Image: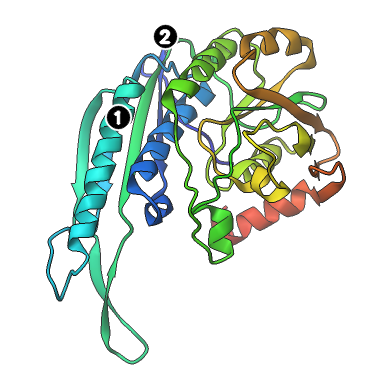
Amino acid sequence: MVSDAAVVRPILGALKGIAITQAINPFYSLIDTYHMTAVTIDEAVRRLIAVGGDPHELGGVDNFCWPTIIYDPVSNPDGKYKAAQLVRACWALRDYTLAFEIPLLSGKDSMYTDGELKGPSGASQKVSGLPTLQFTATAVVKDISKCVTMEFKAPGDLVYILGRTKDELGASEYYQMMNCIGLNVPEVDAEKVLPLYYALYRAIQDGLVASCHAIGRGGLGVHLALSAMGGNFGVGIDLRSVPGDEKLSDTRLLYSESAGRFLVTVDPKKEEAFEERMDGLGYACIGRVSEDAILSISGVDGKIIMTEQIGRLKSAWKEPFGDLV
């Protein structure tokens, strides 16, 4: 099963470690490279926090992968637009590394992600990769014994979503499957999300969190399935409880890729202490982990809109990998 980050223990006899992760979201460039960059940095930060990385001790490495920006009226007529996209991405890199206090340790740029492919007729056609920023991030882990993982741990554990879900399906995995692009790309408000990130980190350090996972590509629906598959447990949730800025449909609540969100489970014995830490920060208990290995989702009208066996979900998830998994 996928993990939010790797945790390395450099000195065998010490409890101090370092968490390392990467994030990449090229499809958001179809709408705005500024927000593509912002969401990518935010996702990397959340992945580190999700395993127990300290959000006050971060480092980052940016890797720009960009189609050529050199304008040519014949071979690259949109070169100026690609240059403008690069400028917007650089603005976001500056804004969000400052907001999250991330020193950039190094960088790598590949500025000619272009080539030619032959079509069925034999004629060559220019193809270019999407403007992309891959962001690698690190965080200090003060005590590796306090690290948590993403899979659900025990039946009866409470399932929480931290952060608000918005109408942000633009360039999402859901829209991609529907052959759409959309308009509302996820945006990051660092000033609003940081208090939540710090509170979650402290809750993890104090042993209040059983599992934690950063919600990213695919939205809540996909990441519920991933955490359930990881633990081989079922889960039942109610979308009416998901905090959002407006009344959203089942589809948007499940597949919006809004930034700044986590999927967390908590032992019921620690419910009160955990909720005290999250008070006022935009969170909700949306369900429970179950022993029956079934994913069950109730929609905004209170009716069950989905039930699926975890085993079938896992088979579907593994299928594209063939014998590799």
Residue ID for mark 2: 14
Badges 1 and 2: C-beta atoms under 8 Å apart?
A: no
Task: Give the residue displayed 27% in from the left and 88% down from the top.
Answer: 123
Lower sequence index among marks 1 and 2: 2
| Nearest to viewer (mark 1 / mark 2) | 1
At label 1, the amino acid type is Asp
Is residue 117 rendered to the left or right of residue 159? left
Q: Mark 1 to mark 2: distance in Å?
A: 35 Å
Answer with left or right where residue 61 lies relative to residue 214. left
Query: What x and y, as percent, mark residue 152?
Result: 70, 30
Q: Residue at x 48, y 22 (%)?
A: 192
Tally the marks: 2
Residue most extreme to the front: 246
Name the spot of residue 250 as percent of width and height, x first: 72, 47
- Considering depth in this image, is 157 or 271 the residue closer to the camera? 271
Q: Quadrant location of residue 207?
A: top right
- Give the amino acid at mark 2: Ala
Image: 90 above or below 274: below
Nearer the observer, 309 or 279:
279
In this rendering, the answer to whether 101 lies above or below 224 is above
The foreground one among 111 and 239 is 239
Asked if 122 appears above or below 183 in the picture, the reply is below
Q: Is residue 275 left or right of residue 186?
A: right
- Location of mark 1 (residue): 95
The answer, for residue 233, to whether it is visible in the render is no
Q: Position of residue 72 (x, y in %)?
A: 12, 69
